[in-house]
Image: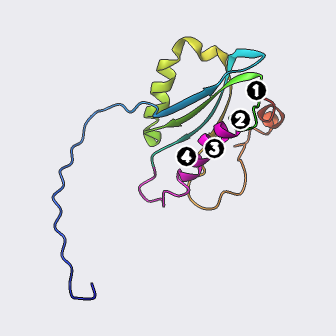
Amino acid sequence: MKHGTVSIEIEMTNSFGNKRSRFTTRRGVRGSEKPDEMVIIGGHLDSWDLGTGSTDNGTGSMAVPRSGASFVEVETKPKRTIDFVLFSGESRALGSQEYVKAHQNELEKFQRCLFMTPGTGRVLAIGMHDNYQDRELAIRF
């Protein structure tokens, strides 16, 4: 640009379809005492078109795999099996719907779900969304 105007020409072809997005990333840590009971720690991979991407949902996309790595690094043996899942198609719940379909016969085994999707802005806390009666349960999986 020091030498004058820069021009770039791009040819891009897009298409729209009815493709159903599946959950994109999934990794589990098997439970030691109740391996058939499941806990989900999840987030989503896509970003809101008006968001910056760093908080919607860069925070969840970073925190979920980091949580899983922490369990492995400190050799924690959770009581229940923990599924670390990053869903795609969050705004239309496509990834989570596909996850539910894939686990249709196991739904009664799911005990808790912590989903990281803070939206835009600073992440200051984990919101309970008026489920304060479950605060003690949320920390004991």
Q: Amino acid at mark 1?
A: Pro
Nearer mark to the viewer, of 1 and 4: 1
Q: Residue furthest right?
A: 136
Quadrant of the rendered image containing residue 123: bottom right
Marks 1/4: CA distance?
22 Å
Residue furthest to the bottom in view is 3
Closer to the chain start, of discs 1 and 3, is: 3
**Disc ID at residue 61:** 4
Q: What colour scheme does the image use?
A: rainbow
Confirm or deny contact between disc 1 and disc 2 (CB under 8 A).
yes
Magenta stretch: give its range: 47-70
Q: Position of residue 65 (x, y in %)?
A: 59, 41
**Vertical side of 80 occupied by 62: above or below:** below
Q: Could you tell me the amino acid type at mark 4?
A: Ser
Is residue 56 on the magenta stretch?
A: yes
Q: Is there a contact, CB below 8 Å, between mark 3 and mark 4?
A: no
In the orientation shown, which residue stands out farthest toward the top?
Answer: 105
Residue denoted by label 2? 71
Q: Secondary structure at mark 1?
A: loop
Is 31 placed above or below 74 here?
above
Answer whether residue 138 is magenta in the image: no
Name the residue that disc number 1 marks: 78
* Residue drawn at (23%, 88%) of the image: 3
Residue matched to label 3: 66
Q: Position of residue 23 (x, y in %)?
A: 46, 32
